[in-house]
Amino acid sequence: MAEPTLNTNTLVTRWHTSQQRAGFKFLVTQILGYLSGGPQRYTGRPMDVAHQHLAITAGEWDAFMATAKTVLAAEAALTPELREELLEILTPFAQQVVSPEGAALPPDPRLSTTQPDGNSL
């Protein structure tokens, strides 16, 4: 959330500073657990619904991946093999997260300003 390249995107910054900050961290942890074999189940929105309105560029995605690599190496102290496995899990999400240059953006689903409906964990 502190990555300066990502926070030059005001739509991303608004999300990072919203009331959903703890939920964001929870969902990132949950999806990584789910995609690496569980037992977690991912309860969040599909990646395209959660990200396409944010106008995330390929450069911003690259900055996110570079930060993920650093965090997985330094702060999580993962082996190089496990770090690469997790990065390979994240890589395909670029297709769902990055907005094509010049493409019309979908409307903001207002996920950063609405309270959860109480029907999820």
Image (tube, rainbow, N blue to C red):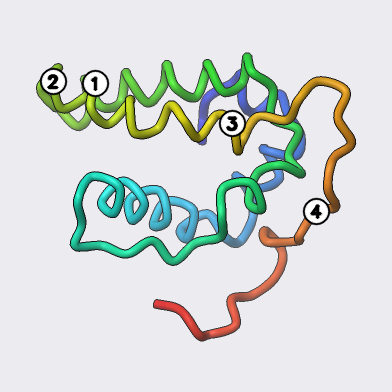
Q: Secondary structure at mark 2?
A: helix
Pinpoint residue 64: horizontal percent, then vertical percent: 49, 24
Q: Distance between the Cα atoms at labels 3 and 4?
A: 19 Å
Residue 60 is left or right of residue 33, and the answer is right
Give the residue pinned by disc 2.
81
Q: Nearer the viewer, mark 4 or mark 1?
A: 1
Specify the amino acid type for callout 3. Gln
Q: What residue sits 32% from the left and 64% below the top?
A: 41
Q: Earlier in the sequence, mark 4 or mark 1?
A: 1
Q: Going 73% across and 30% down the picture, which residue do you hit?
A: 99
- On screen, residue 106 versus residue 118, left or right, reads right
Whether pointer 4 and pointer 1 mark residues with C-beta atoms closer than 8 Å, the reply is no
Which numbered disc covers residue 84? 1
Give me the disc on residue 95.
3
Asked if residue 61 lies left or right of residue 113, the reply is: left
What's the residue at 25%, 27% (across, down)?
72
Q: Dots 1 and 3: beta carbons under 8 Å?
A: no
The CA span between labels 4 and 2 is 37 Å
> Residue 57: which numbered mark, if any?
none
Which is more foreground, mark 3 or mark 2? 3
Label 3 sits on a secondary structure element that is helix
Query: Farthest residue in the bottom direction?
Result: 118
Q: Marks 3 and 2, how far apart in space?
A: 24 Å
Tag 2: residue type? Glu
User: As rendered, which of 92 and 32 lies closer to the eye?
Assistant: 92
What crowding class fits label 4: few (fewer than 14 Cα within 10 Å), some (14-19), or many (20 or more)? some
The x and y percentages for residue 37 are 19, 51
Cα separation, mark 1 vs mark 2, equals 5 Å
Residue 115 vs 32, above or below: the answer is below
Q: Considering the numbered disc 4 on the image, is that residue within a helix, a strand or a loop?
A: loop
Residue type pointed to by label 4: Asp
Judging by the rendered image, the residue that carries numbered circle 4 is 108
